Image: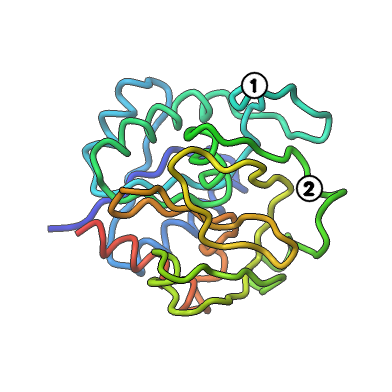
């Protein structure tokens, strides 16, 4: 019996198709299939997601700051209202099932906001090292320290890994019932785990861009899918 991973629809333009292919291939290498969840009907989207074995919340547009009690700063990108509306509903419904959840970049930030946390709307003025290389997404740009005795540590077996985060926003305050499990060289939280949940892990970086040639990053997808069986 095949394992199916629900991923909310990211869009159909050429860049989004390219981005989607990275998630698709990473999940397929881990031995599962992807079901793209259309977001034009919230009730239907939630039901389709719940029919799957796991949920992957992918990267994308900045989250509407009003959802975490802030006024949008001029440096905050334009939110995707459709994704904001539906992905919070899908996450909240899915987490109640106890099925595995993996959040990446926007998905990492969404999980934090859904649990009552807040975000830095732009880290350009406060970061102390480079976090992104948009043109070389598969290359290591900075390092993160992984906390021992966490799901991320169990996945990687290391306390330090190289990543390419590709982000301009970051977690400010950690949401309720979440544990920070990875931190960047300059102190930004890059890993979160939901307490008392079998497998709800989120990372700020983009393992899907590195997973083809980096077995450590592919291991995150492998561990996610293994927990979906």
User: Quick check: 109 left or right of 78?
Assistant: left
Local crowd size for mark 1, using a 10 Å CA cut-off: few (<14), some (14–19), many (≥20): few
Q: Which label's residue is closer to the chain start, 2 or 1?
A: 1
Task: Write down the quadrant of residue 80 in the picture.
Answer: top right
Residue at image location 57% in from the left, 60% down from the top: 206
Q: Residue at x 34, y 67 (%)?
A: 223
The residue shown at (37%, 21%) is: 42
Foreground pick, 97 / 104: 97
Instruction: Point out the image quarter for the C terminus.
Output: bottom left
Name above or below for residue 197 compared with residue 1. above
Q: Secondary structure at mark 2?
A: loop
The residue identified by callout 1 is 66
**Residue 39 on image: x %, y %:** 42, 27
Q: Please tell me which residue is depicted at 53% across the width and 28% down the height of the picture.
A: 84
* Residue position marked by numbered label 2 in the rendering: 123
Q: Is residue 186 left or right of residue 140?
A: right
Q: How far, Cα to Cα, is label 2 from label 1?
A: 18 Å
Image coordinates of residue 144 in percent, x first then y, are 62, 69
């Amino acid at each position: 019996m095949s394992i199916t991973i629900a991923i909310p629809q990211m869009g159909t333009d050429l860049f989004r198709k390219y981005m989607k292919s990275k998630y698709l291939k990473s999940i397929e290498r881990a031995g599962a299939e992807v079901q793209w969840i259309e977001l034009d009907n919230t009730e239907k989207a939630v039901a389709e997601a719940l029919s799957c074995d796991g949920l992957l919340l992918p990267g994308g547009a900045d989250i509407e700051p009003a959802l975490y009690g802030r006024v949008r700063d001029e440096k905050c990108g334009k939110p995707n209202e459709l994704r904001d509306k539906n992905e919070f509903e899908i996450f909240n419904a899915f987490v109640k099932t106890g099925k595995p959840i993996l959040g990446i970049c926007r998905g990492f930030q969404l999980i934090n906001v859904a649990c009552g946390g807040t975000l830095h709307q732009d880290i350009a003025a406060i970061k102390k090292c480079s976090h992104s290389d948009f043109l070389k997404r598969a290359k290591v740009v900075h390092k993160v320290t992984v906390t021992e005795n966490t799901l991320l540590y169990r996945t990687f077996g290391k306390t330090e890994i190289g990543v390419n985060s590709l982000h301009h926003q970051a977690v400010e305050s950690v949401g309720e019932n979440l544990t920070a499990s990875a931190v960047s060289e300059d102190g930004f939280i890059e890993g979160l785990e939901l307490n008392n949940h079998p497998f709800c892990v989120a990372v700020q970086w983009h393992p899907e861009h590195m997973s083809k040639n980096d077995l450590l990053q592919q291991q995150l997808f492998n561990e996610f899918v293994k927990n979906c069986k």
